[in-house]
């Protein structure tokens, strides 16, 4: 018997409108994208199917901190594609040691657990914290608790959405894993009250991105460090969005010179090319894992390790952190000038801002659509808040032009 052959008719190139329409019946509706179909990109610029150009002020939720197709990252990926792409962790590969050493050096921590997506890093961090609580802290079996903050965003798996307080993300997906306690963000007294002998870890974002780029008060991260030390539990910083240059430092926790016990990294670690995430921790913490207790088919694959190593090399120069800090001042000044002219408030650190728009001017979605017409890509978060997070390679002139577009979109 011969397999039926199916000839695929040569297809005429389809327009943006046709492609958007073609998606609806076949693609799950878990996103509501802006009506633009991107076909090409370089640096801070993307181009749609019809050749219209847009300034990317979202940068893949900070997965594109180095811009689209950064030459050094593309070269590292090409080189690795020609050598070896996947081995599984059943065998060693010649790229993984360098990646892990580089990441340990960049973060000042000792050990690395390579994964793929951010949510996997969070899940892995939770597993490691629980194992540490039983093996090292002496918490009775199955009693470990992890304290999280209200308004958190840590990903989309069932365990993680179970401790989210965003109804859209959570409702309808239960039952959820027990063992989590939620306290208000930026509230040290509430955190202190939630810690006890069962606490394995406190898991927080040093800046809450999805919540609208909420920056805690000065002293909050220091306080979390102090309280976790006193309780004898772990401080886990989810730097998946805030880390790797975005805020003007390699890590957002550096703004208070705080060193957590465990860091969760993702997004920009893959250079906008492949999903790469990692749990990075002190040896006493990650050392609790033994063979067979955790794993990932793709985690630590040579292509991911090669791209991740190239990302670490870019960050080691300090250039991107410096740019984020310098241009962050331009961003802040620009937003300050718009305050009262359609902007009701904003929070910014480095090249990252949450901008509250006067609801009378439209929802965040409507402002995003107006900016799209102005040739600028952004994404709303909640209500009338939009977030700005351009690639760290953006120039002063491009940033100023984007702020001009925002002014017009509010006018
Ligand atoms: C994006 C994000 C995650 C989840 O990452 P995915 O790669 O989408 O699974 C987790 N935590 C934070 C803070 C994030 O911004």
Image (tube, rainbow, N blue to C red):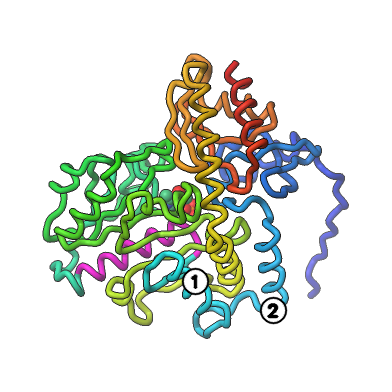
Looking at the rendered image, the disc whose residue lies closer to the viewer, 1 or 2, is 1
Residue 94 against residue 372 in the figure, above or below: below
Looking at the image, residue 207 sits to the left or right of residue 366; the answer is: left
Location of residue 282 with respect to 247 vertically, above or below: below
Q: Is residue 249 in view from this perspective?
A: yes
- Going 30% across and 63% down the picture, which residue do you hit? 261
Provide the major secondary structure of the magenta segment: helix
- Residue drawn where x is 80% and y is 73% of the image: 2
Q: Which residue is mark 2?
A: 83
User: Split into 4 quadrants, where in the image is the C terminus?
Assistant: top right
Q: Residues within 10 Å of mark 1 (few under 14, many from 20)?
A: many
Q: Quadrant of residue 164?
A: top left
On the image, the x and y values in percent for residue 47 come to 75, 42
Residue that appears at 88% across and 52% down: 10
**Could you tell me which residue is drawn at 67 percent across and 73 percent down?**
80
Q: Which residues are magenta?
A: 116-133
Q: Is residue 350 above or below residue 121?
A: above
Q: Mark 1 to mark 2: distance in Å?
A: 21 Å
Q: Earlier in the sequence, mark 1 or mark 2?
A: 2
Say whether residue 119 is magenta.
yes
Find out if the beta carbon at label 2 lies less than 8 Å from the nearest ligand 1 atom: no
Secondary element under disc 1, as helix, strand or loop, is: helix
Residue at the spot of label 1? 102
Q: Quadrant of the N terminus?
A: bottom right
Between 408 and 25, which is closer to the camera in this rendering? 408
Q: Nearer the viewer, residue 280 or 86?
A: 280
Q: Secondary structure at mark 2?
A: loop
Q: Position of residue 358 (x, y in %)?
A: 47, 18
């Amino acid at each position: 018997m011969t397999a039926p052959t199916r000839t695929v008719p040569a297809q005429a190139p389809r327009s943006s409108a046709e492609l958007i329409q073609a998606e609806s019946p076949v693609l799950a509706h878990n996103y509501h994208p802006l009506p633009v179909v991107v076909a090409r990109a370089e640096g801070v610029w993307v181009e749609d199917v019809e050749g219209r150009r847009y300034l990317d002020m979202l940068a893949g939720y900070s997965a594109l901190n180095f811009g689209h197709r950064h030459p050094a990252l593309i070269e590292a990926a090409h080189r690795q594609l020609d050598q070896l792409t996947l081995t599984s962790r059943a065998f060693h590969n010649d790229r993984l040691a360098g990646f892990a050493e580089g990441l340990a050096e960049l973060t000042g921590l000792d050990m690395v657990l390579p994964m793929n997506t951010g949510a996997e890093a969070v899940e892995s961090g939770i597993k490691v914290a629980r194992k540490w609580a039983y093996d090292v802290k002496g918490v009775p079996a199955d009693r470990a608790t992890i304290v999280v903050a209200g308004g958190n965003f840590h990903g989309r798996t069932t365990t993680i959405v179970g401790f989210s307080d965003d109804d859209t993300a959570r409702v309808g997906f239960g039952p959820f894993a027990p063992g989590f306690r939620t306290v208000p963000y930026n509230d040290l007294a509430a955190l202190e009250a939630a810690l006890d002998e069962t606490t394995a870890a406190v898991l927080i974002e040093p800046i809450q991105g999805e919540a609208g780029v909420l920056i805690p008060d000065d002293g909050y991260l220091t306080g979390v460090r102090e309280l976790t030390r006193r309780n004898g539990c772990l401080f886990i910083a989810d730097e998946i969005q805030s880390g790797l240059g975005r805020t003007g430092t390699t890590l957002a926790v550096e703004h208070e010179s705080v060193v957590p016990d465990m860091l969760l990294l993702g997004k920009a670690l893959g250079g906008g090319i492949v999903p790469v995430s990692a749990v990075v921790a002190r040896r006493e913490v990650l050392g609790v894992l033994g063979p067979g207790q955790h794993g990932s088919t793709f985690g630590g694959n040579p292509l991911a390790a090669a791209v991740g190593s190239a990302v670490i090399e870019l960050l080691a120069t300090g250039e991107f952190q410096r740019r984020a800090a310098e241009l962050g001042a331009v961003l802040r000044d620009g937003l300050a000038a718009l305050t009262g002219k359609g902007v009701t408030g904003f929070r910014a650190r480095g090249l990252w801002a949450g901008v509250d728009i006067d609801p009378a001017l439209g929802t965040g979605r409507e402002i995003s659509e107006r900016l799209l017409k102005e040739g600028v890509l952004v994404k709303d978060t909640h209500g009338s808040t939009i977030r700005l997070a351009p690639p760290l390679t953006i120039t002063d002139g491009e940033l100023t032009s984007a702020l001009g577009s925002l002014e017009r979109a509010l006018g």
